[in-house]
């Protein structure tokens, strides 16, 4: 007669009258601390395993290569971290990379490197702003608005290039992808520099605090006098800007504005953020952990190559990493369906 | 099951329960008779909810036993308690808003014909249950379209449809207007007349006195007194709850009233407000009374720049202002403590210092960087000032009790030294001791020249703490009274 519907089950209230909630939260904090170490430990463990099975892994050249491989996704993922912290999502980063990349290639050829790069970066920020305005002013769901931008950006890339790659003639431009300073590739330097800037923005500035607060509870934040629409729009602009930096690095590395550049990157970017443990519900996360997430993905991809694993496996392995990383985080939470 | 009409329908005997070393309940005994409403009162943390959860099979007691109609019972899980006829009605309604009344009531056992839902029978069954409860509701209305009180009726009907004979209600009136409370009470009386056992947990002593007999008081996990209603007085019950006599429930101190701070003239909004005019002076508490839905919160939101005005003007210290956003309001020296602190007042998973400095963060920036040390020390100052009980500034807001959470929300606005503070239900859901502390803070604020606009559905609170009382009904102001007005006058204006 009486079913097992959760409807009629007396609910466990989120806030108990009692101390256990405090004990639980202390415990959760300990678990969380272990996990943020865990991510680093995981990276080290994977590295140790690879070092023991492959003599080339720990060489300077290979490690720099790993960092180089990680750089484009990492830079874009720093931006995506901000978006996800506001409980949003930006699916358009791969397309923004593609469009800004070919536009940069073309404008650099016509007007020189500085103007070319500036145009590309401005375009990225502008595309992000457009997504942001659709989200904040037209009240669209971030998923929808940026899905549209994903299609529009890629479409414009093909229109702009007629589907043909654009060869970049400027060596100055290509320095940003192919050059190195004291043997460290420029993209790696860019990655760490942008990481540092993003870390400061997120942890040390009002902007960063507001981003976290908006993700924590937009209503509370708005009633505290923070113009949340403006901040959310700025966050999408930042993501667009950093996607354009990704476009710069990739285009400069290839020496070519590739109309297919960045296809599918949004998934790697979101994966890096998620492996880093930033909550898709917003409010909690860090760019440092996103950096670790991007590095773990690159290390594993590198390891598969070193171990001569059939490259077709790499996608599946990446999926498994996401599951393992998020599993560690989700065990402390109630099920989505409870 | 209906044979369980013995005097003591429910007996909890010597219940003890500890969580992680903290003794939540110690040797608690409670007897609830069939056909009676047993009131259970106590401060937050006294153990009321734990006791109900033990009755509902959510927790297993460490010691003690449960008897139903004199027969020992023990529940391994909530389903077992349900099967024994026990249902709990929570403070927040627990319904599926897009499904109909009938579907909500019968969701777990929809009548079927073959593999399909038997809709005609569902409708008839549902109508019968509602009729039995004397509740006039269309079984096909989506529950989301009903008022909160009606949604609660649906929950009660669901319990009855599942043959519950013992209903435990945990703060069922917390979000109901007084009209709706009246509807709920008539349903409760209907139920008890049919022999249902009701356990009624509430913070609002008035309501407990109205509906419950006997009344049991819990304090710090122990049963400190059970008395028939005839012997219960507010003073006595509060003293038992708090463990010490409270000299005055409303320690109002009248401050010197200065010039006008807020002047609202002929204000209207698209939605609800019509031609509202109101003033608040320096050093004055203006109490805004009315039923839920009268437009009091809407007025606060319009003044604070959340909702747009369609007509009318707002003056702050004599100067006409345009408040287009909360940021504008804050710049003009207005603070707003919203009614639902968990949803609109606090970032529950953020540390206290971050909650504290959210509206005033600009002040904690030095050469572009937010300086956490300044934030924590600012918060620490307020913990002393308002006696906030927190481990430290890094504790998460959700770990505090309701009273302390409310003080944190107050502190975050006081950091900006507002000239006008709007308090929406400032003491809802917090215990008696913490209430008096909030009143003391209000006294200190008006003495230092702050103007306070206090919205409250707790009429004794409005009467006890206001210098002036403004009453709203259906978006309009329907009465204004000086301090000392009679309860009946205010009620009359509220129903208008």
Image (spheres, coloured by chain):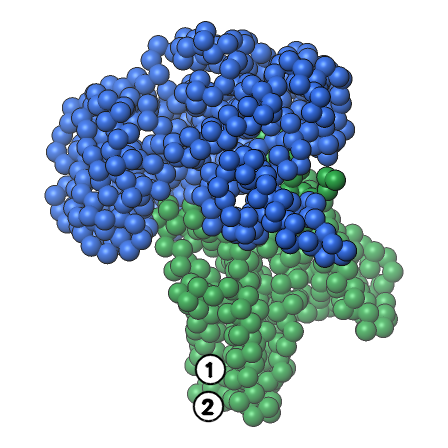
Counting from the top left corner in percent of width and height, residue B231 is at 45, 7
Say which quadrant the N terminus of chain A sits in. top right
Where residue A59 appears, x then y in whole percent? 77, 64
Question: Which chain is displayed in blue in the rendered image?
Answer: B
Classify residue A8 by image quadrant. top right
Per the image, label 1 sits on a secondary structure element best described as helix
Q: Position of residue B153 (x, y in %)?
A: 52, 38
Q: Is residue B269 above or below residue A15?
A: below
Q: Can you tell which mark lies on residue A116?
A: 1
Q: Are marks 1 and 2 on the same chain?
A: yes
**Residue shown at the point (25%, 36%) measured from the top left:** B496
Image quarter of the C terminus of chain A: top right
Residue B365 visible in the current orientation? no
Q: Is residue A86 visible?
A: yes
Q: Is residue B154 above or below residue A135?
A: above
Q: Which chain is rendered green in the image?
A: A
Q: Is residue B73 left or right of residue B455?
A: right
Judge left or right: residue B32 versus residue A119. right
Horizontal relation, residue A58 to residue A252: left or right: right
- Residue at horizontal 14 percent and vertical 36 percent from the top: B260
Q: Residue at x 56, y 19 (%)?
A: B36
The front one of A244 and B299 is B299
Rendered image: mark on residue A110: 2
Q: Nearer the viewer, residue B300 or B353?
A: B300
Are there few (<14), some (14-19), or many (20+) residues within 10 Å of tag 1?
A: many
Q: Chain of mark 2?
A: A
Asked if labels 2 and 1 touch by Cβ distance under 8 angstroms, the answer is yes
Closest to the observer: A246 or B470?
B470
Q: Disc count in the image?
A: 2
- The x, y position of residue A105, in whole percent, is 53, 85
């Amino acid at each position: 007669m009486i079913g097992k519907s959760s409807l009629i089950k007396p609910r466990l209230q989120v806030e108990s009258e009692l101390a256990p909630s405090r004990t639980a939260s202390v415990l959760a904090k300990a678990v969380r601390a272990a996990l943020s170490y865990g991510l680093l430990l995981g990276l080290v463990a994977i590295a140790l395993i690879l070092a023991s099975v492959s003599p080339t892994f720990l060489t300077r050249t290979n490690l720099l290569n790993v960092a180089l491989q990680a750089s484009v996704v990492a830079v874009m993922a720093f931006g995506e971290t901000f978006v996800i912290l506001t409980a949003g999502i930006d699916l358009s980063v791969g397309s923004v990379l593609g469009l800004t990349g070919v536009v940069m290639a073309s404008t650099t050829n016509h007007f020189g490197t500085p103007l070319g790069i500036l145009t590309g970066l401005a375009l990225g920020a502008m595309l992000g702003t457009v997504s942001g305005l659709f989200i904040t002013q037209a009240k669209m769901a971030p998923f929808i608005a940026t899905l549209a931008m994903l299609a529009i950006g890629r479409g414009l890339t093909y229109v702009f290039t007629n589907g043909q790659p654009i060869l970049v003639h400027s060596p100055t431009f290509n320095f940003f992808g192919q050059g190195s300073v004291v043997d460290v590739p420029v993209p790696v330097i860019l990655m760490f520099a942008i990481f540092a800037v993003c870390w400061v923005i997120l942890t040390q500035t009002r902007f960063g605090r507001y981003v976290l607060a908006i993700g924590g509870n937009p209503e509370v934040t708005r009633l505290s006098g923070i113009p949340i629409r403006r901040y959310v729009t700025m966050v999408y602009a930042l993501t667009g800007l950093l996607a354009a930096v990704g476009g710069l690095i990739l285009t400069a590395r290839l020496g070519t504005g590739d109309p297919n550049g960045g296809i599918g990157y949004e998934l790697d970017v979101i994966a890096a953020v998620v492996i880093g443990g930033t909550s898709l519900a917003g409010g909690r996360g860090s760019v440092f952990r996103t950096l670790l997430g991007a590095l773990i993905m690159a290390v594993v991809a590198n390891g598969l190559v070193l171990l001569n694993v059939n490259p077709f496996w790499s996608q599946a392995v990446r999926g498994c990493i996401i599951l393992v990383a998020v599993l560690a985080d989700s065990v402390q939470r109630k099920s989505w369906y409870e | 099951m209906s044979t369980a009409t013995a005097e003591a329908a429910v007996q909890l005997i010597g219940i003890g329960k500890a969580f992680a070393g903290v003794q939540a309940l110690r040797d608690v005994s409670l007897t609830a008779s069939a056909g009676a409403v047993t009131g259970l009162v106590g401060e937050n943390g006294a153990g009321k909810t734990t006791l109900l959860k033990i009755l509902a099979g959510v927790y297993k007691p460490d010691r003690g036993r449960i008897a139903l109609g004199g027969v020992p019972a023990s529940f391994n899980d909530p389903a077992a308690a349900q099967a024994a006829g026990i249902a709990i009605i929570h403070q927040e309604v627990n319904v599926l808003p897009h499904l109909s009344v009938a579907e909500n009531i019968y969701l777990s056992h929809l009548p079927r014909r073959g593999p399909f839902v038997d809709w005609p029978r569902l409708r008839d069954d549902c109508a019968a249950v509602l009729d039995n409860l004397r509740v006039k509701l269309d079984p096909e209305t989506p529950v989301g379209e009903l008022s909160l009180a009606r949604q609660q009726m649906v929950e009660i009907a669901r319990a009855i449809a599942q043959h519950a004979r013992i209903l435990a209600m945990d703060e069922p009136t917390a979000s109901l207007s007084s009209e709706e409370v009246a509807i709920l009470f008539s349903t409760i009386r209907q139920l008890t007349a049919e022999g249902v056992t009701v356990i009624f947990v509430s913070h609002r002593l008035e309501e407990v006195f109205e509906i419950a007999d006997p009344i049991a008081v819990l304090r710090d996990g122990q049963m400190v007194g059970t008395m028939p209603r005839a012997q219960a007085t507010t003073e006595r019950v509060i003293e038992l709850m708090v463990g010490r006599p409270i000299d005055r429930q409303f320690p109002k101190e009248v401050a010197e009233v200065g010039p006008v701070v807020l002047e609202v003239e002929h204000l209207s909004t698209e939605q609800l407000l019509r031609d509202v005019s109101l003033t608040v002076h320096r050093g004055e508490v203006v109490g805004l009374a009315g039923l839920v839905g009268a437009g009091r919160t809407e007025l606060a939101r319009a003044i604070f720049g959340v909702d747009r005005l369609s007509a009318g003007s707002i003056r702050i210290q004599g100067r006409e202002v345009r408040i287009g956003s909360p940021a504008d309001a804050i710049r003009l020296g207005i603070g707003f403590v919203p009614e639902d602190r968990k949803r609109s007042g606090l970032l529950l998973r953020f540390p206290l210092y971050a909650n504290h400095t959210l509206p005033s963060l600009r002040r904690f920036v030095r050469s572009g960087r937010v300086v956490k040390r300044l934030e924590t020390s600012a918060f620490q100052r307020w913990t002393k000032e308002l006696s906030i009980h927190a481990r430290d500034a890094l504790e998460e807001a959700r770990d505090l009790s309701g009273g302390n959470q409310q003080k944190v929300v107050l502190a975050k606005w006081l950091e900006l030294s507002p000239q006008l503070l709007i308090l929406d239900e400032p003491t809802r859901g917090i215990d008696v001791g913490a209430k008096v502390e909030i009143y003391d803070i209000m006294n200190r604020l008006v003495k230092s020249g702050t103007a306070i606009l206090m919205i409250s559905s707790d009429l004794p609170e409005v009467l006890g703490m206001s210098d002036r009382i403004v009453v709203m009904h259906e978006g309009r102001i329907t009465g204004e009274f000086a301090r000392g007005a009679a309860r009946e006058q205010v009620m009359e204006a509220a129903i208008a």
